Amino acid sequence: MNTPKFVFILFLLSFSCCNSFTDEAELLKNLGTFPKGALLTTDFKSFEEFKSVVSIEYSTSGKAWVKLNHTSNSGEVISVLESGVSEADFLKAKSGGFLDKVKLGFRSPYFVLNRNNLMRVYFLSRRRHKDFGWPDQAFFDIAEMMMNNIYKADLASATEDELSEKGYINTFNHVVAQGLMTTLFSEKLADFVADTHERKNMPELVTGEFSEDQLKDIKNGVVDNYVDIINNEWGQEVGKRLKQKYKINKETFWTSQLLADYLNEFQSYFSRVFKLRFNPITEKDEITIRFANKINRVMDDVSGMW
């Protein structure tokens, strides 16, 4: 085990109108049985309102955990977040000594065993211009592109909150990033990345012992973090289905056409969930060309990038 390297990745993980318009019927025809599920933080005015949509259960003894259950139409997702290591622990170990790194390895053997794929996720989730050229693209750029692809008439009728960073962009980012992680690697790895990030954001998510400020701050408090957790689960569901539909495995070569088709599936999903219309993503868009190349390079070998 290369201990100086293995703690160097996850502490920074997070979660970052020219085409012709395709009508809603065409966007939706390939959805199949994809369940409707993703949420917008900005749709909720209080924690109580959120609890009317998502059921929440906390452990009463032993190890602390929270269980979130969201049912939407024919679909259901369940997420269990337990106490454990977080991005903050990786930060601490990185700045600490050799023994700190060894202790963290014992606390999180999954990280040690999967550090190569987690390194790949790190590169895909961050802009790395020096490694991939300018302008490098990351998960957030895909979410931002999708937001800009919303049909102008639908953008005009959206609220200011929906168009803010905590609106569509945040939801698109979590759903698509978790979907891609699941397709490229596994649902378990996507869960691990999501959980370590949420524990760092707010450790109280596991216990339910929130302050008044955390409860009242919709855009940065309890509601926002729980919405992210639910959206992570919906993203994984879509990612699993697309992995099967496109027969994607670790050897798959990502062309810009494949990535465009893949991302248009997510836009179709969001079209159904939020009743939005999108301009389609094409294989000629710069982001599909550059991000497809980035996926291929990262999936091949990242050893020389450290």
Image (cartoon, helix red, strand yellow):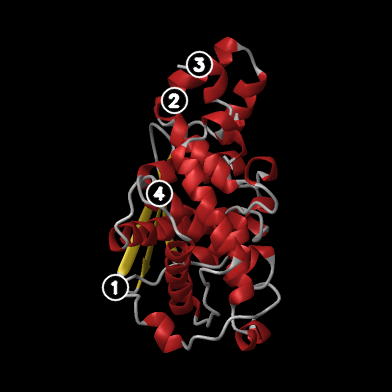
Mark 3 lies on a secondary structure that is helix
Image depth: mark 3 or mark 2 in front: 2
In the displayed structure, 124 sits above or below 219; it is above
Question: Of marks 3 and 2, which one's residue comes earlier in the chain?
Answer: 3
Q: From the image, tell me which residue sits under label 4.
A: 184
Q: From the image, tell me which residue sits under label 2.
A: 112
Q: From the image, tell me which residue sits under label 3.
A: 103
Question: Of marks 4 and 2, which one's residue comes earlier in the chain?
Answer: 2
x and y, in percent, of residue 217 in the image: 68, 58
Mark 1 lies on a secondary structure that is loop
Give the Cα separation between the discs numbered 1 and 2.
37 Å
Q: Nearer the viewer, residue 226 or 102?
A: 102
Task: Determine contact: label 3, label 1, CB under 8 Å.
Answer: no
User: What amino acid is at disc 4?
Assistant: Leu
Image depth: mark 4 or mark 2 in front: 4
Task: Report if residue 15 is visible in the image.
Answer: no
Task: Determine contact: label 4, label 3, CB under 8 Å.
Answer: no
Image depth: mark 4 or mark 3 in front: 4
x and y, in percent, of residue 153 in the image: 63, 89
Q: Nearer the viewer, residue 127 or 291?
A: 291
Task: Determine contact: label 4, label 1, CB under 8 Å.
Answer: no
Question: Of marks 4 and 1, which one's residue comes earlier in the chain?
Answer: 1
User: What amino acid is at disc 1?
Assistant: Thr
Task: Report if residue 101 is visible in the image.
Answer: yes
User: What amino acid is at disc 2?
Assistant: Val
